[in-house]
Image (spheres, rainbow, N blue to C red):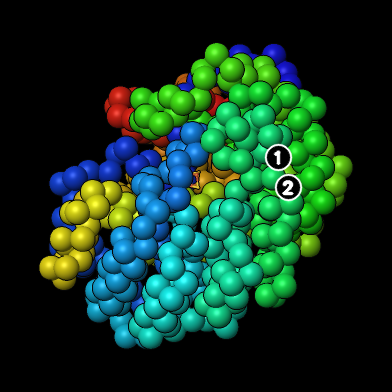
Amino acid sequence: MTDVTLKYASRAVPRYTSYPTAPHFSPKFGRQTYAQWLETVDQTVPISLYLHVPFCESMCHYCGCYTKITKKEKPLQDYADMLVREVVLVASKLPAGQQVSHIHWGGGTPSILPHDAFLRVVNSIRTHFTFTDDMEHAIELDPRTVTPALAETLRLAGITRASLGVQDFDLKVQEVVGRVQPYELVKQAVDALRAEGINEINLDLMYGLPYQTRETIRNTVELTASLDPSRLALFGYAHVPWMKKHQRLIPEELLPGAAERIALFDDATEALEEHGYEKIGLDHFAKSDDPLAQAAREGNMRRNFQGYTTDEADILIGIGASSIGKMPQGYIQNSPDFAGWVRAVEAGELPIARGIAMDQDDRARAAIIMSIMTAYKVDVAAVARDFNVPIEPLRSCYLALDELVADGVCVRDGDQVSVTHQGRPLVRLVASAFDAYLQTGKGRHSVAV
Ligand code: SF4
C-alpha cells in the first residue's frame, strides 16, 4: 500500500465493465432500433449469449446483484419457460443457425433452476443456434446448491466452466454477511463438478468485509488455493446501501477503512502470487497456462459485464430480466421490472427497457478505457486515428490526469498514457479521465479501491 493509493482510495468511480456505463442508458431507447441492429448480425461471425436468472434461495447481505428470493419451484419453472420464449424470440430476429462461441449464465443463482427446466432452456438454445466447436459454456454457481445431481445436469448441458462464490472462509465473516458455507461444503461442490469432467473452475473471493483481518484473508487464500482453481477473482465489497437496501444489514462500523481494504487486497494478492497465480487486470488471477493469462500477456484480453474475459465476440445478446447486451452499435438492457419483462416476451416484443446508441466519440472513448483497464496503457492519438475522431476533445481529458501524473499514478508522454505499477490499483481513476458522462451527475459509484 502506498500513501498515494490511500489518497485516492475513497474516490467514487465506475468499474467500467461497459462504456458508456449503465446509469447513462436511456429509457427513450426504442425496441425498433434494437430489432434493426439484430438484423445486421452476420450468421458466420460467432456471438455470445448471456442468460440472467434473478433468483436466489436467500439474500447475502453484501449482494450487489439484481435478484429476488424464492424457495418455490413454480416461479422458477415459469421463468425457464419465459427464457425459452425469449430465446425463440431473439433467434427469430437473427439469421437462422446463428453461430455462438460463448454462453454465460449469471444471476442471481442460475443453478437454482430445477434441473429439467435448466436443460429445457439449454436445449432451446441448441435448437436455435449453432455452437462453435470450441464454445465456452460458463455458469455462476452458489456452492450451497451444488450436488452430484446438479453436476451431472451441468455436464449434460455442456457446461465447460463454473464460477463459485467463496468470498471468505472465516466463519465469523460468513455469519455477518449472511452466507455460511464451510470449506468442506465448497470442496464437495468442486469435487462434484470435477467428477463430471467440469475442470475449469473459477473461485470468487471478496475483500473489504466486516471482521476480515490480514490473517483471516491469508487463511482464506490458503484454503482457496488448496482447491486448485484455474482462475480467481478478488472483488472489493462495494457498499452501496442507497442502491441495495439489504446492505444495511452489514454493520457499517465494522467495515474496514480505506487503508485496511488496501492491506487486505495486497495480502491476498501476495498470497495468491506465492501460489503461482498471475495477477490479471484489476482483480483477476489465473494460472500462467490459463487462456486468460495468455490473453493478458498477448494483449487480447477484454472486459465485459462479467469482468475480464477471453470472449472476443463483438456481440453479446442478453436474455432474461435485467440482462444487458452489447452490439457494435451500442448497449441494450432488458426490463428489470419482472412483470414488464414477462408482458413483453408474452406479446412477442423484445423486452428491453433502456439502451444507448453509441456515436463515434463514445466508441473511441470506450476503446481508450478498455485499453487502460486491460493493458494499463493507451495511445490516444492512435485511437483517434482508428476511430476517425478529432483528437482535441480527447486531449482535453489530459487535464484530469495532471494530478494523477504528479502523484505517480500514471505517466503521460505526449498522447501516450500508461498506468505505473504503483498506480495499478487506481486504474479506474485513470480510465475515468476519459469518461465524457462522468460529470453529468447520473449514478453514484463505489470507491476506487
Ligand atoms: S447468491 Fe449471489 S446473487 Fe444471490 S444473494 Fe447471494 S450474492 Fe446475491
Residue 374 numbered mark, or none: none
Observer-nearest residue: 53 or 323?
53
- Residue occupying image coordinates x 64% and y 69%: 148
Position of the C terminus by quadrant: top right
Residue drawn at (79%, 56%) of the image? 228
Query: Of helix, strand and loop, which one carries label 2?
Result: helix
Which residue is pictured at 51% across the width and 69% down the height?
102
Residue at the image point whose x is 40% and y is 53% from the top: 71
Find the distance from the CA under tag 1 to the CA under tag 2: 6 Å
Q: Residues within 10 Å of mark 1 (few under 14, many from 20)?
A: many
* Depicted 227 relative to depicted 418: above or below: below
Q: Position of residue 167 (x, y in %)?
A: 63, 41
Q: Tell me which amino acid carries mark 1.
A: Phe
9 sits left or right of 315 in the view: right
The residue where tag 2 is placed is 183
Q: Position of residue 391 (x, y in %)?
A: 42, 39
Circle 1 is placed at which residue position? 169
| Relative depth, front residue between 98 and 275 | 275
Q: In the rendered structure, are the residues bearing label 1 and label 2 in contact, judged by CB atoms less than 8 Å apart?
A: yes
Secondary element type, mark 1: loop
Q: Earlier in the sequence, mark 1 or mark 2?
A: 1
**In this view of the protein, can residue 7 be seen by the observer?**
yes
Quadrant position of residue 430:
top right
| Amino acid found under the numbered disc labelled 2 | Tyr
Q: Residue furthest front?
A: 72
Quadrant location, the N terminus: top right
